[in-house]
Structures are given as structure tokens and as C-alpha cells.
Amino acid sequence: MKSPPLVPAEPAAAGDGTPYSALYDDVYHTAHGGLAQARHVFLAGNDLPSRWLGGERFTILESGFGLGLNFLATWQAWRESQARGRLHFISVEKHPFRRDDLAVLLAAYPDLAELSASMLEQWPPLSPDFHRLHFDGGRVTLTLLLGDASSLLRQLVAQADAVFLDGFAPAKNPEMWSPALLAIITRLCRPGATLATWSVAGDLRHALENLGWTLERRPGFATKREMLCATLANAVSPAPTFQAMPEDVSRRAIVIGAGLAGTAVSERLAARGWRVELFERHSRPAQEASGNPSGILLPHLAKDDALAARLSRACFLYALRRLRDLPGVRWSPCGVLQVARDSAHEILQRATIEQLMPPADFAAFLEREAAARLIGHAVVHGGWWFPGGGWVSPGSVCEALLAAGGERVHARFDTEVASLRQTDHGWQAFAADGQLLAAAPHVILANAHAANRLLSSTLPLTPIRGQVSYLPVDAHERLSFLHHVVCRGGYLTPPDAGTVCFGASFDSGDDDLAIRVADHAGNLQRLDELLPGIADGLDAAQLAGRVGLRSAAPDRLPLVGQLPDTDAAATSAATLENLPRRAGLHALLGLSARGMVWAPLAAELLASQLDGEPLPVERDLVHAVDPARFHLRALRRGTHGL
């Protein structure tokens, strides 16, 4: 599902000053006040806040984000009601405002200033698809679906408690009120869900009644005599991808591995009230693949915007938001220049930007001369420029995640889990001497290729040896001009990162941890190809460095989710939704060389699945990283004799 470039909304006003859309020839809200309308129509119309008091979570689905007044009014009411659970607000918008334009529009609402500022601080570059934003320590989550409502809502995995049916007037924007879209929205609702809208159009009432909604007319806002409210008695069963967490289930998990994957999912579960036993065989976190002094943050682009590129974009933008929110992380969004490998790749890079038309604050193509001016050194070709990318210390991220998890995460270092046993009550973890280490309903494998030592049926994970080299301190001055990360076949971090890293080797199937002079020589060659002349006079035999083993699946995508039950009966007709699974056994594996980009959103996805919350990415991306995908492919190959 390739997403077309977004067309941002342009700020304009009607004659009375009400925000106005030239695209739809309609105002964003009544002239009598958008905030008052939000409170009367959407909050009161759904009997809020009384309905969310006392619950674990409450999910609202909105059609038409606009200025965000409905969200901000809801967030404000959530705070004032002192709700104890978690609020999920999901909203779709085809033509979002740019951050600066939205800031000007929201300045008209000073009583929302604090909330508006928090939202604007996290406002994403206007790239399509899903964007998840967290507020109030994670108690309030906004999931923005930017693009076509019908396409994106079909990809949403959620169950809504309330619907804010908003948008431009049916006569101006009939697609947002069509029976087909209303059917999609209805399928995303749980039994007992409510709906409110300012419209009482006859076609709308007829469509909702046909979908099973019981309608009620209530007094409208300002000059509108009536508004429409509705209740859904019998919801359509949700797609099997969504599994609500029973209220009485103990939220406890064992996590194995304290690198980026393990600490990230531990923190995400802790934020939801889970208790986590985190096991790490080393004496501190981030000692294996996550242990390099610095890694780089940049997304993967593809001209066809295929699954891997879409997932990478979502993960990259989410990672940036999480890093800004985590105190104590050593990192810098200094920007990343990805120089083209050769002339053909330069042509492809240029064409990719022309095809995708990304916002300039996300990605751009720089011709060779512009790229050289940016970094202060000659380059052989132009390249992609990612102004929000940069470098990060993975170890500091792991430490910050453990600190954020607080007392809910019990980290047990110098403790290796040697075996797992499934019981009627969940899982038990044992040491090599048979000592019971922990028991919990759920186990999450986050220990890279070592996970296969704990499984009876192995996953297709390959160790990939990567050796990074460190620039000698007395040579840092030759990079005094460099303030950005530069990459090509290899990468180079700027002196501001502390230890200047360059490399790295990429040897699939190699698990040797010894430093090799030949690999240092290879890294020097990559450095010279990246910035000609910088490697002059450096001796490979005198370099220090580090070896890490990454773990990768055959398709180079992560493994995130519940593991398949490979012993259960299944046929080639099975799907990911109905394939038998190992109860309580989950994976966050295969992060390869992109752990810092993949891990934060992968952890949010897995934690959302475990807690029965709306998922943060599209359904086809959930399927793309499902660890059962390989078992399903094997079943189909076997049936067809391949």
C-alpha cells in the first residue's frame, strides 16, 4: 500500500475569522467557538468524562483531526477528571497543518496553551501513515493517521469506546460520511460504544441505523437545533489481530536480554503497569550488539515506498520522539548525509525524492556541491540529507530506559536463562544448574540470535559480525570541520560524539568476536571512499575498535510478536490471524544493524499487543514483522512441494 505524498492544509479564515479550508470550501468549526463545540458535541455527546472514570483504558476514534481542538479538549477533560487509566485518542486527517501554521491557529486558545505546546513539540513531519505520540508520561496517547481515511482506517487495529464523527459538511466532503467509511468505523468499535456528531443529515442517520447504531437526537450547539448521538449494542467482532487484555490477567513478564530490544520492551510494559523480570547474562546492559559507543539514526528510503521503507520511516520518527522524552540519553539530532554509492545510485536517490516528495524536514536530496558545502569536505557524489537524523549512544539509551521503568523493572544481571518450561500458568525460566529463576504468564525473547538456544523450533536468525573502528584521539583534529553524521558503504560519526566511530564490517554467518586488522583496513577503505583523504596516514594495525554480533532474519525485517506453535496442526490455507501460537511466548528479535531505529517502535508494538491496546502501526506492517511469517511460508512451500 504505497501512500501518496500529503497535501498540507493551508491556513485561511472566513469573513468572520473562523478557520477555513479552501480545499473543501468550509470552516473547521462553528463561528461560535471550536472549543465550546468540542465540549458540547463530542465530549458531552459521548457522556464524557463520566464513562472513562474508573476504567483501565479508554479509546476514542475521530474522523477529522483538523486543528486538534477535539483532542486537546478531551485531554484537558481527562486531566481535570483525574482519570486513573490510559487514554488512547486515534484521529485521521488527510490534510494536516504544518507545525508552524498549527501553532498560529492554536494561539487563539490560551487556556489550551500548555497542552498545545506539548502537542506541537511532538508534531511529526508531514509524512503519511501512522504516527504515535505520548503525553503525560504515557497516560495519554495520540495516534495520528495522516492520509486517506478509508485506506488508513482499514489498516487500523483497535476497538473504540467512543467515536467523534467530525469533518467538513457532508455536501462538501461526502467521502468522510459515506456508508462504506461508516461501516469501517463501526467495525472498529466495541459493544456499547457511543458516537456523537453535529450532523443530523438524513443519509447519515439511515446509514448508521443500518449498521446497528441506536440513534438519539439531542440539543445542538449554538444555532444548531439538534445534534446526533448513538449507541452500538452489537459490535461486529474485531479482526483476530486485535486481542483485548482481560481485566483480571496479571500483568507480569520475563524479558531475556538487556540490550536495546529488552530494555525498550521492559520500559514500555512498565509504563502500562506491568511487572518485568529482566535477565541479562552480562554485568550491565548493552554489552553485545547494543554496546558500540555510538550508532546512527536514519531511515531507509525506497522509490516504491515498500513495506520496509514505510516501517523504517515510522520507526525512525517514533525513535526521535522517544529520545527527546528520555532524560540522560547521549545523542544529537545533528543530521545525517547518506552519500550515493556511485552515479547510478545518485540518480536513484534523486528520483526517489522526486517520487516520494517527502517534507524537507524529513528528507531531501543534495547535489554534490551542496553536500560538500554542508559537511565541509569534498564528496564524490550527492546524497540524501536527513536533517532530523544523527548519532546516539545505545548504552545511554538502555540505561535511560531502565531508569524510566523504575521499580516495575527488576533487572537481574550476571544471570543467564539456560532453559524455559511452559506450564499451565505460563512460563518458568531456569538457570543452567536447574534453579528456578522466575515464573510469569509471558516470556519475551530479546536476546538476538541466542534466542534459538531456548527454543525447540529455531527461528531463521543469522548472526552478522560487525567490526567498528575508532579514530585515534590525536587524529580528531582532522575532522574538526565535521558536525554531521556521514555514511555511504560505511559511516562516520562527528567528533562531538566523543569516540569517533567509523566502519563497519558486515559479515553474515560469522560469529567470531576477535578484532581483525583486515577489518580495520576495510573500514579505512570505506572511510576514504566516504571522505577522500581523511584516512591518509592511518595504520590499520594501530586502530582500536569493537566487534558486535547483530542478528538478522532473511528479509532483514524484525521479528515482533507472538511465536507460532510449529507442532500444532495447520495447513497452507492458514493465515497469520488464525495460525496456532505458543501461548505467552513472544519475540523482539532480528534488529540487525538498525537496532536504534527499530527497537523503540517495535517495543511499543509488542507492548500494545500484550496489553490489548490499539496498535501503533498499520495492519500490513504488523504482518510484515510477525515472527510467524516464516512458519506460514514453510507451510505453503511444503504443500506445493517447493
Image: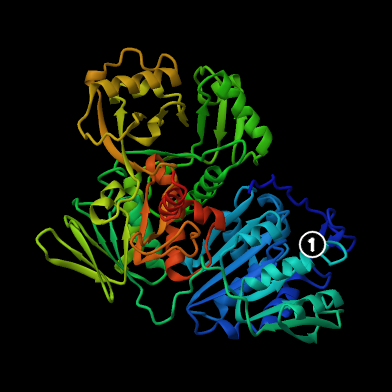
Instruction: Tell me the amino acid under the disc marked 1.
Output: Glu
Residue 554 at x, y percent in the picture: 41, 41
Relative to 396, residue 547 above or below: above
Residue found 64% across the figure and 68% down from its top: 71
Its colouring scheme is: rainbow
Q: Can residue 44 be spotted in the picture?
A: no
Q: Quadrant of residue 51?
A: bottom right
Density class for disc 1 (Cα within 10 Å; few <14, some 14-19, many ≥20) is: some
Residue 407 at x, y percent in the picture: 29, 68
Give whichever of 397, 624 is nearer the camera: 624
Give whichever of 494, 581 is nearer the camera: 581
Residue found 52% across the figure and 44% down from its top: 308
Along the horizontal axis of the image, is 569 left or right of 465?
right
Most extreme residue toward the right, as rendered? 15
The residue identified by callout 1 is 175
Residue 158 at x, y percent in the picture: 56, 68
Most extreme residue toward the front, as rendered? 641
Most extreme residue toward the left, as rendered? 433
Q: Can residue 43 be spotted in the picture?
A: yes
Along the horizontal axis of the image, is 241 left or right of 25?
left
Q: Quadrant of residue 192?
A: bottom right
* Quarter of the figure with the C terminus: top left
Give whichever of 446, 585 is nearer the camera: 585
Residue found 90% across the figure and 60% down from its top: 15
Give whichever of 642, 302 is nearer the camera: 642
